[in-house]
Image: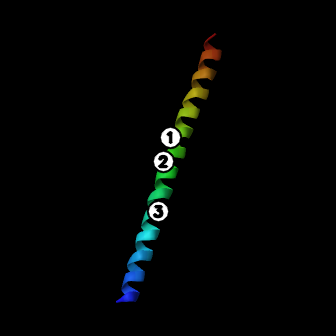
């Protein structure tokens, strides 16, 4: 009984850690996209003028 509880608890912990990891990765990816778009916009702007 206690072993099963510990197993379930550890699985929940790893699951929440995985969600945090995915959330962080998505956040970094979005930041990168915004950064990339900004750099592209600046390069295009300079090239046009």
CB atoms at circles 1 and 2 under 8 Å apart? yes
* Dot 3 alpha-carbon crowd within 10 angstroms: few under 14, some 14 to 19, many 20 or more: few
Q: Is residue 41 above or below residue 36?
A: above
Tell me which label, 3 or 2, sits earlier in the chain. Answer: 3
Q: Quadrant of residue 8?
A: bottom left
Dot 1 lies on which element? Answer: helix
Q: Which residue is mark 2?
A: 26
Q: Is residue 8 above or below residue 3?
A: above
Nearest the viewer among 29 and 6 is 6
Tell me which label, 1 or 3, sits earlier in the chain. Answer: 3
Residue at the image point whose x is 60% and y is 16% from the top: 45
The tag on residue 30 is 1
The tag on residue 18 is 3
x, y percent for residue 37: 55, 29
Nearest the viewer among 44 and 36 is 36
Query: From this viewpoint, which residue is outermost toward the left?
Result: 1
């Amino acid at each position: 009984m206690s072993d099963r509880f510990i197993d379930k608890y550890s699985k929940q912990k790893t699951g929440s850690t995985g969600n945090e990891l995915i959330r962080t990765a998505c956040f970094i990816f979005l930041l990168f996209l915004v950064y990339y778009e900004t750099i592209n916009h600046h390069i295009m702007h300079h090239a046009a003028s």
